[in-house]
Amino acid sequence: MIRQPCVYLLASKRNGTLYVGVTSDLVKRVWGHKNHVVDGFTKKYNVCDLVWYEVHETMESAIQREKAIKEWQRAWKLKVIEEFNPEWKDLYDTVC
């Protein structure tokens, strides 16, 4: 995958702890989460499976979408994951 603004959701497991983020380099960012490069929420709770992502034309639109998703109820986040990735597979290898 080429570098492009993305919003993404990580999960610790199916229906587990969720994390929403934004990046211009999805592969590098998810690699960092998987390898616990930075201390923080995803390292503390082992949230590293890429279960959903959305590509954007601009970083500004990706940031706006991330902020909106952070305000969503958990049920809405689960629904978007289920629609995009019903088996909750780790999509990291599909974006490399």
Image (cartoon, rainbow, N blue to C red):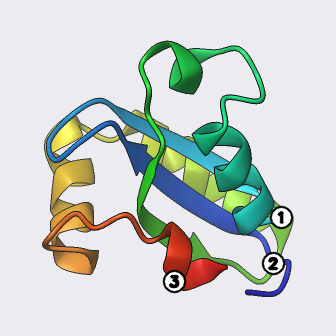
**Circle 1 — which element?**
loop
Please tell me which residue is depicted at 69% across the width and 78% down the height of the picture.
56
Q: Earlier in the sequence, mark 3 or mark 2?
A: 2
Please tell me which residue is depicted at 77% across the width and 83% down the height of the picture.
57
Q: Which mark is residue 24?
A: 1
Residues at discs 2 and 1 in contact (Cβ within 8 Å): yes
Residue 29 location (% of width, % of height): 74, 52
Please tell me which residue is depicted at 71% across the width and 14% down the height of the picture.
39
Mark pair 3, 2: CA separation: 15 Å
Q: Is residue 45 left or right of residue 82?
A: right
**Label 2 belongs to which residue?**
4
**Label 3 belongs to which residue?**
94
Mark pair 2, 1: CA separation: 5 Å
Q: Earlier in the sequence, mark 3 or mark 1?
A: 1
**Circle 3 — which element?**
helix
Amino acid at circle 2: Gln
Amino acid at circle 3: Thr
